[in-house]
Image (cartoon, grey):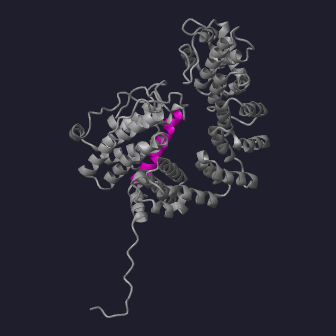
Amino acid sequence: MSDELEHLKRKARPDDIESLRRLDRALQRTGWHVEGKTFREWISEYIQYPLNRYLDAPPPAEHLIASGLAAVPALVETLRTKRLSTESQHDIRIRGHCVLTLANIHPLPTCAVSALLETLRVPSTMLRRLTLRALAQFPLRPTPLAVDELLSCLALRHEPYVRAEAAGVLSRFGAPLPPEIRREALKRLTDPDSRVRRNVLRLLARLPAPDPEVRTALEEHVILDDANRLEAIRALLAFDEPRALKFLQDELLGVEKDERDNRRALVCLRALQLVEALGARAMPTLPALRRISHRASVAGFLYTAIDSIARDQLSAKSPAPSPEQLRDERAVRLLEAPTALRPDEPPDRALSRWAAGFLPYGRELCVRIALAAARHVANLWETEYSLYGSPRDALHLLAEWLDDPNDTSARRAVERADIIPSQLCAPSAFSASWCTTFATLCVATEEQLKEWTRGVQPLESAEGGFLGSAVLSACRALGSRSVITLALGSAEEAPRLSQEEAAREVRKAIVDEVLPWICGTWDPVKDVLERRRQWLAPPPAPAPGSTGRYPP
């Protein structure tokens, strides 16, 4: 029977429920238990644990999550049972924990998507929200079942949170989108809840262009919807980019009317973040960026936006590294994928150990690696708390240290990033703030650290001191997980990426920024800084005009 089990485990596929059911039946025949109980016995204990908004599975779920795909048939069977308890509250409680358990099994059991969609029919706002958040993690296709259930949620009149979550899931559908989704999305542009309209705009942005009706609706929305104007501009980019960029310039220049108006300042900062995301596509906004360059309140965001445009232009023009350049020992190590010491080692720890391997190559390389990781997640702090300082300020000072290494610039960078974030921050923002702090500490010696800081120590869970801590914190930020202590503020924040995806994305950001410098094709720090200075330099003073008279 052990040979049969091994064969069935190898044949188990996350997208094939029948292969998982065969494995489940074989386990039941052998009397297989997890910590003395079957999967269904552990599921029966879910009734003891109330649901919460924090996407936390109850303690019994740990055993099912650890068992992986083998536990999926029992969970799906439970969700499809018509009645789980005589009390409605207990029925919803068990279903909710089953949903959370499925969302935490890796690899994601895509064969359970239909059971999750059917769970949306249960009349419970909490259960629907949990299920929609779980579905947002799965790759979804616009099947008739998925379209019908999600559009039904989008039409729930008295559940704005459910409508918003449903619109968010619809915006993640793979193309092509059915025409009924387009029709319903256009209707929902008038929804009274701004969160619903925001996610509907993201959905409309995925429709194929040209589409005159959608273009007109989006242009009207830019003018009418103050709460979602930037999201409407972002959507309009796909249908009329010149017009959208004109609207974006107007948002940037709004800060000129009254810099002390927090609302106008926040709109400008959000617009600068959109410029950063567009990169070279936002080149037409450069005149507007120059006009607000003297505004101290937006300096950090402004420099980042301009750097993004410059980085895209320089990267497009730079040559690819030659085979000879890629033989550099540092380039070889950089392109090697991190390896886990054991199967259950978290990917972020493996990546921090990979980064620690560059410590013998000198401080400049380590600072560049930490800077690349911190840059990639700095916007997670800015998105949450734009008016309360930006980690970009410290990262710009770190770039200036790389351009001209000296103790004065190093101290300025360390002191600017010496911020202890509140535990009331969202987990992503909390970790992003610490990532910036750890990155700047890579420039200081042990003696300087004692003089410049309040005794900040690197993470015990990361190898490589402050370098490894910066890399690990970046991974945690992308995964909406906290470092050091529990972040309490927005504990219900849904995970942005899985642990594997977060580690992969941070490593890619490091390679993209550090490899060109190692190979000598271009410098993503110094060359960008030079281009920014050129663009923001004041124009030369005009030569004095002739008066037609001889000088005295």
Tell me residue 142's x, y (percent): 74, 37
Give the residue displayed 39% in from the left and 68% down from the top: 538
**Position of residue 362 in the picture relative to residue 111 (left or right):** left
Of residues 371 and 335, the one drawn nearer to the viewer in this rendering: 371
**Position of residue 341 in the picture relative to residue 279 (left or right):** left
Residue 509 higher or lower than 91, as above or below: below
Tell me residue 6's x, y (percent): 62, 17
Q: Is residue 539 visible?
A: yes
Of residues 443 and 233, the one drawn nearer to the viewer in this rendering: 233
Give the residue displayed 46% in from the left and 62% down from the top: 291
Q: Quadrant for residue 453, please give it.
A: top left
Q: Is residue 357 visible?
A: no
Label total for image: 0
Question: Magenta residues, as a range?
Answer: 500-518
Q: Quadrant for residue 547, please give it.
A: bottom left
Give the residue displayed 70% in from the left and 29% down from the top: 158
For the C terminus, the quadrant is: bottom left
Residue 169 higher or lower than 536, as above or below: above
Q: Quadrant for residue 415, please give it.
A: top left
Magenta residues, dominant SS class = helix
Verify whether residue 318 appears in magenta.
no
Residue 543 higher or lower than 106, as above or below: below
Of residues 419 and 444, the one drawn nearer to the viewer in this rendering: 419
Give the residue displayed 31% in from the left and 52% down from the top: 401
**Position of residue 232 in the picture relative to residue 262 (left or right):** right
Tell me residue 47's x, y (percent): 61, 10
Tell me residue 540's x, y (percent): 38, 73
Verify whether residue 509 appears in magenta.
yes
For the N terminus, the quadrant is: top right
